[in-house]
Image (cartoon, rainbow, N blue to C red):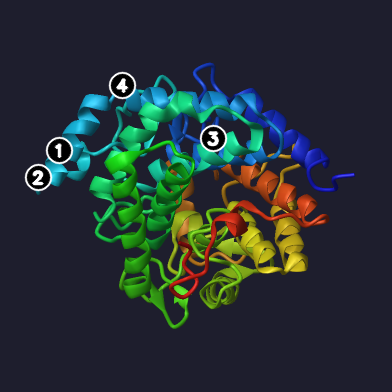
Amino acid sequence: MHRYTASRLAEHSLALIADLQTPEGAYPASPTFSAYTGYCWFRDGSFIADGVSAAGDTDGPTRFFDWCAGVLRRRADHIRWIVAESRAGRPPEGSQMLPARFTFAGEDGADEWWDFQLDGYGTWLWALVEHADRHGVEAERWRDAVELTVDYLTASWQRPCYDWWEEHSEHVHVSTLACVAAGLDAVTDAGLVEGTRADEARVASLAIHGLVVERGVRAGHLVKWLGSTAVDGSLAAALAPLGFVSARSELGAGTIDLLERHLTVDGGTHRYLGDTFYGGGRWPLLGCFLGLAQLEAGDRSRAVELYEFAASTATPGLDLPEQVDGHLLAPRMRQEWLDRWGTVATPLLWSHAMLLRLGVALDASASPAPSAASRTSQPVQEGLAR
């Protein structure tokens, strides 16, 4: 009996995500939250696709990756222009780069947003390879879109851009670099890029790993952005499921330890110290990322605790929120966001997907088998894979 993936909450999560996937194949971030309604992010959507794929859904993620590929194909000429300009030493302005989110029809948004983010494009590469390997899906159907994405990333990865939280566009973020490298590694290993393009992807990945060793590590742990001393809850993803850093390495252990000590309270994980969004609450999806990292590091009991906290945040209708009250970092700021955008996004599909992903991993750990992260991680350069 699969304890976690057979629970009522897991069944609700799978059904919710499947029911809300659009006819085009997009995954809405949240169906009712005012600032997210009508949009799909490559980052959120890729992690959503990975979560439901791991839980056994083949069709939904395939349709999502088809949607992503369509978005990219329609922008092929623009992507080629970005790449040519960047390689000529004339990198386009951030407003001319690919956006982080699109309408369900695959169009750019009409309202202002903090759009220039690179992490989602690496994440979709990584997630589609995971899905194809997991279910025997022929990834060749996405080759042309993969090639466009690899060119975009190899030409752009060094640039500062907004992070997962659409903040601090002046920095190069370690979580973003982890997503980019994981995606480039995945498609080169899968043979979805060849020749010079594959060589450029490998060179970029090696350069990313070297840069993180040089400027993205402090006192034995990963940091929020290059040259920083702070940490961020998104760094857990670099350990698992992305496998950018081995969770069992000293660097992985140091990162887990700091995330636990600085950002995790009563089983819930904050984004970062100083967070003021809705008062700076704890995000169930970040606890699930940390749970995956703990499980990969060998601490199953702690992973279970993190899972149980995330599950406990569900509403009576079994919907999971983006964040929860209690232990707010900036309680005086909560009302400002309530007035601006209404109540916290609930349900957030990304939260449901990460709970599924951690639940699948916990069930699988009852009969240990090599995980994706342990298969791809080769602990060199202080724990950095590859």
Badge 3 amino acid: Ser
SS class of the residue under badge 3?
Answer: loop
Badge 2 amino acid: Ala
SS class of the residue under badge 1?
Answer: helix
Measured as percent of width and height from the top left, residue 351 is found at: 61, 45
Read off the residue under disc 4: 74
Judged left or right of residue 19, residue 382 is left
Q: In 3D space, how far apart are the residues under numbered discs 1 and 2 (Cα atoms)?
A: 6 Å
Q: Nearer the viewer, residue 363 or 200?
A: 200
Q: Work out whether mark 2 precedes mark 4 in sequence or the reverse, and give the earlier one.
A: 4
Do the residues bearing badges 3 and 1 touch, measured as CB atoms within 8 Å? no
Q: Nearer the viewer, residue 326 or 6?
A: 6
Read off the residue under disc 3: 30
Judged left or right of residue 351, residue 121 is left
Give the label on residue 84, or none: 1
SS class of the residue under badge 4?
Answer: loop
Read off the residue under disc 2: 88
Q: Does residue 322 appear in the picture of this structure?
A: yes
Give the label on residue 182, or none: none
Q: In 3D space, how far apart are the residues under numbered discs 2 and 4 (Cα atoms)?
A: 23 Å
Screen quadrant of the N terminus: top right
Q: Residues within 10 Å of mark 4 (few under 14, many from 20)?
A: few
Do the residues bearing badges 1 and 2 touch, measured as CB atoms within 8 Å? yes
Q: Work out whether mark 3 precedes mark 1 in sequence or the reverse, and give the earlier one.
A: 3
Do the residues bearing badges 3 and 2 touch, measured as CB atoms within 8 Å? no
Measured as percent of width and height from the top left, residue 216 is found at: 37, 70
Please tell me in which quadrant of the rendered image residue 19 appears.
top right
